[in-house]
Amino acid sequence: MPRAGLDPAAVVAAGAALADEVGFAGLTMGLLAERLGVRTPSLYKHVAGQDDLNRRIAALALDEAADAMGAAIQGYAGRDALAAAARAFRAYVLAHPGRYAATVGITADDALFAAGDRALSALRAVLRSYPVQPENVDHALRTVRSLLHGFATLQSGGGFQWSADVDESFEWLIDFADRGLRSQSSWSARDTGPSSGAGALP
């Protein structure tokens, strides 16, 4: 019988917390079973295996990031909304580096696609304040996501060692993105070919 009080959601939550503690690369079914006080085979009553656990943690992280950004942008538009979403995303990644790392390079399933779309919905709302042409929305989303993801993951991994203040650098990034998005009215659509549709996010 499964351990009382243990279900898929509890296993995934414990796995996400452990990933934040030891790093995503260090998360194993054996280590998670030890943390939960069960034998490793008991976990297979709740998740199909390591890959399934990783996907579920990735979906959880994207849902949580979506909630953080969505709440942050309420009542804001333009640069204020962009800044609110950016700061919320960065804060989330810094607080939960292990579980967020699960979202990188993961093979997507329906749950992960849905979570990824929720995470992007806040950024789509931000873009509505900017003159981004409909055919360029995916490119704008990828650009903003790349800026935020790159900065947050570099910082969480200790990648910024120079003396310049990191918070000031992040505000510089927000200004940079804001200026670029506001300049979209003078841009023409670029024919970059069809999207592959691969991955949980554009």
Image (cartoon, rainbow, N blue to C red):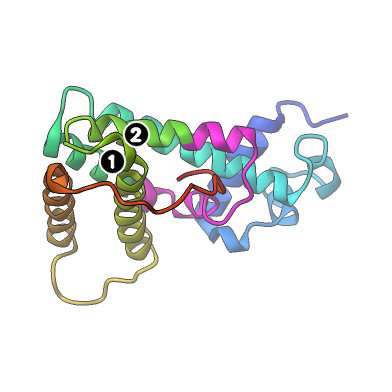
Range covered by the magenta-colored residues: 91-116
Q: Give whichever of 201, 153 is nearer the camera.
A: 201
Q: Tell me the SS state at disc 2.
A: helix
Q: Residue at x 52, y 50 (%)?
A: 103
Read off the residue under disc 1.
Answer: 88
- Report if the CB atoms under discs 2 and 1 are less than 8 Å apart: yes
Q: Is residue 107 magenta?
A: yes
Question: Taking 60 as reference, is 149 left or right?
Answer: left
Amino acid type, residue under disc 1 in the picture:
Ala
Q: Find residue 72 and report its horizontal and vertical position in percent.
A: 25, 31
Q: Find residue 6 and report its horizontal and vertical position in percent.
A: 72, 30
Read off the residue under disc 2.
Answer: 68
Q: In whole angstroms, how far apart are the C-alphas of marks 2 and 1?
A: 6 Å
State the residue lying farthest toward the top: 75
Q: Find residue 189 and report its horizontal and vertical position in percent.
A: 27, 46
Q: Give whichever of 4, 15 is nearer the camera.
A: 15
Against 8, residue 75 (above or below) is: above
Question: Taking 164 as reference, is 29 left or right?
Answer: right
Q: Give whichever of 134, 130 is nearer the camera.
A: 134
Q: Quadrant of the N terminus?
A: top right
Amino acid type, residue under disc 2 in the picture:
Ala
Q: Main secondary structure of the magenta part?
A: helix
Q: Where, by quadrant of the figure, is residue 125 drawn?
A: top left
